[in-house]
Image: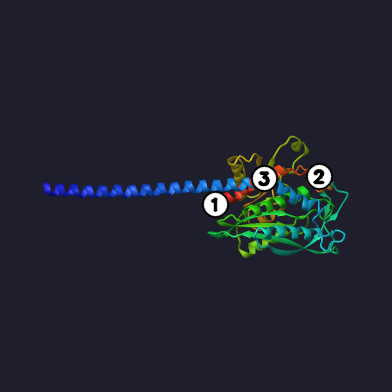
Amino acid sequence: MADYVGGYMKRTGIYATGFLLLFSAAHLGRAETQQQTVNDNNSTDASIRRLIKQVDPERISRNLFYLSKDPLPYRKLNLTLPGHQKNTLYEADDYITGKLESWGYQVKREGVQVQAFRRDTSKPKHAQYSPPKPEDPWYTAYNLYAERKGRSHPSRIIVVLAHKDSQSWIDSPGANDNAIGTVGVLEMARLLAEYKSESTIRFLFCNEEHTPWTSKTAAQKAKSRGDNIVAVFNLDGIGAKTAQETAAGKKTNVTAYTEPEGKHLAELMGEVNARYSIGLEQRTAKRPRPGDDDGSFVLAGYPAAVINIGSLPYGDPNYHAEGDIPETCDIENAAMTVQATLAAVVTLDQDL
């Protein structure tokens, strides 16, 4: 019996020791995993802080004035400046393409047949666009694409877009609507040119002030290819708000979503604004129906889509008018919105 008990105790001791070793190894493994997660989060956080610090308001301003004042007062297919060979929208396309290529991107152009809107002066100024007649001229408008291919998940796509054209029915510089969004996306493309993304980040420069909107083609073709678009961020009228808000020095952004799948993107904008102390008066809104270029993606079957806009309802007093000039844009506000969008995109990219 003593030998049996002694043997039993030895075996029990061995089992207990083995159990303790296994428990310790498992605990150590969990601790290492948790520490790795902390390290990864810290690395992502540091990367985002470096990126948003490099957003350059002066560069944003230079690009804005180029595209909405000098040398290009407009960006429309139905206006060619005296002595120029190309219409003003094609000239804007060349400028945007040149910038993207200088940062190492390959730019793809996608032609879409469109018409200019007609103008109905019996309507309020901001709503004077009217459908074209069948006999009105047709033009080829181009979607411009540039991509940062993902390393580990290249089929997972985040889209950042802006419409680059100005109003086809009126001679408006379209600075807030939407040269400011265009140069905001350009600034993001510049800063992400060397960023090692896990997902593919796709930049799209489309056209919304001619008809049909070329974002519809972009979204429908993406769907027909089976593109796995997990998020769409539309920058349109960033920093634009009421005269009273501007006079009060407010720095505003509204992130609006249409479908429930877009809500987390809107909430993420608020989270990064707070986490990185960007300083926007940020709020979230739900739209009753799809609208603007993000709406084109919602209608094509990509519900995780939002618009970043300075105010909603849109408060720019020069909306769709000749007075929408670059001098009235709030560059600082726009740069802050670019920072927040950039932080949201990188956060999504790393959140696999």
In this rendering, the answer to whether 127 lies above or below 133 is above
- Counting from the top left corner in percent of width and height, residue 80 is at 84, 60
Q: Which mark is residue 318?
A: 2
Dot 1 alpha-carbon crowd within 10 angstroms: few under 14, some 14 to 19, many 20 or more? few
Using the numbered discs, state the Cα–Cα distance from disc 2 to disc 1 in whole angstroms.
39 Å
Q: Sort mark 3 into few (<14), some (14-19) or many (20+) by Cα contacts within 10 Å.
A: many
Q: Earlier in the sequence, mark 2 or mark 3?
A: 2
Mark 1 — residue? Answer: 350
Nearer the viewer's eye, disc 2 or disc 3? Answer: 3
Neighbourhood count class around disc 2 (C-alpha, 10 Å): few under 14, some 14–19, many 20 upward: many
Q: Amino acid at mark 2?
A: Asn
Q: Which residue is mark 3?
A: 337
**Chain-order first, disc 2 or disc 1:** 2
Q: Nearer the viewer, residue 19 or 335?
A: 335
- Which numbered mark, 2 or 1, is in the foreground of this view? 1
- Find residue 45 and report its horizontal and vertical position in percent: 55, 46
Sooner in the amino-acid sequence: mark 3 or mark 1:
3
Q: Residue at x 72, y 52 (%)?
A: 182
